[in-house]
Image (cartoon, rainbow, N blue to C red):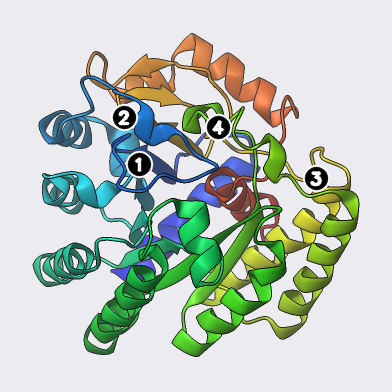
Amino acid sequence: MALINKLRLLQDIIMLKLGYPRMFSITINMTDKCNLRCKMCNIWARQTKNEIKADVFEKQMKESKTMQRVKLFNFAGGEPFLVKDLDKFVSAVAKHSKPIQVRFVTNGFLTNIIAEKMEEFLEEHKDMSLGVKISLDGTENTHDHIRGIKGSFANVVKTIDKLNELKEKYGNRLGINIGFTVNKINFREVNDIYNLAMKKNVGFLFKPIMRIRKFSNEESVGDLFLNQQEVDELIAYNKRFLKEGKIGEGFMEKMVYKHFYRIMNKYMKEPRNYITCYALSGSCYVIPNGDVTSCLLLNDVFGNLNERNFDEIWMDERSVKRRKEILNGGCHCLTPCDTIPSLMVDKFPFY
């Protein structure tokens, strides 16, 4: 089954290269609720009403051919492990599609809940591969300072250890990655967290901080951007990671991550398009109230899952128009949620 799904993903990538929209990756921002108070994100302060419910998501999975064909599901937030019926979302994916991986983007604070849920999912859905991307933004004092809650670093390490215990039991069905958001406070600690990732035998990906309206961080991140001297220092770290190659898990992920780092070196010096972006062609983004958007960065909305079938939204006249604009280089960014799926297509077959 895993081989068949990978061949189907290959088919999607080829169709995208030929100019046909084929959504293979979707990020569901399930909730704005968060148990941390990060300096670069004010999402926790929102009071979003009518966050998408599991029964609505299940109905979409049942009725939407486009969503059924998705190969990579990403559940994020806020903090997805605060969603009480998270298991129902995962069950809907398992029931109505054949994904290559279902991934959870978490701050790693809720160690026991995360470990228990992941084991539950691995036991209940034996044909499904799962991934966990855990945010870790520096050594203990730095991470706790950035994340706004004392003990955050210690909990992340405990969570990684618990997940590694599960990985020993379930093998390659569980992938673990550390995600590091680089800013002025922590950029000299990238190497420390990279070494920690190598020690724990998990994947590692870092990215520079960005202004993202969906995180309500446009005002709060201004003092966190790197100056040019700091950017040059970060690029030196980057070259080491590229040389050693100990990034990501699995062949394709490692190759795509390498391309991401190469583009990052250029982008941090001169922000512009370096690849074709396939947001709204090969991927899309759903925010907590059910609005379907092209990506993490843009504020365009093409419909709401509480009101319309996803297939209708996907082929809506506004979606088609925006899709063409994005493919023609109408915007640029360095957010992994959007850049990495695009790299999978743009760099094919030369990984």
Marks 2 and 4, how far apart at CA = 17 Å
Q: Which residue is mark 2?
A: 288
Q: Secondary structure at mark 2?
A: loop
Numbered circle sitting on residue 217: 4
Q: Is residue 292 visible?
A: yes
Q: Secondary structure at mark 1?
A: loop
Marks 1 and 2, how far apart at CA = 9 Å
The x and y percentages for residue 217 are: 55, 32
Please give the name of the residue rendered at 72% of the width and 68% of the height, measured from the top-left corner: 188
Marks 1 and 4, how far apart at CA = 13 Å
Comes first in the chain, label 2 or label 3: 3
Q: Which residue is mark 1?
A: 78
Numbered circle sitting on residue 303: none
Comes first in the chain, label 3 or label 4: 4
How packed is label 4: few (under 14 Cα within 10 Å), some, or many (20 or more)? some
Q: Nearer the viewer, mark 1 or mark 2?
A: 1
Marks 3 and 4, how far apart at CA = 25 Å
The x and y percentages for residue 279 are: 57, 35
Q: Nearer the viewer, mark 2 or mark 3?
A: 2
Comes first in the chain, label 1 or label 2: 1
Comes first in the chain, label 1 or label 4: 1
- Which residue type carries mark 4? Asn
Q: Are marks 1 and 2 in contact (CB under 8 Å)?
A: yes
- Which residue type carries mark 3? Tyr
Q: Which residue is mark 3?
A: 274
Q: Where 332 sits versus 226, above or below?
A: above
Q: Nearer the viewer, mark 2 or mark 4?
A: 4
- Which residue type carries mark 2? Pro
Q: Are marks 3 and 4 in contact (CB under 8 Å)?
A: no
Instruction: Find residue 112 and report its image quarter.
Output: bottom left
Q: Secondary structure at mark 4?
A: loop
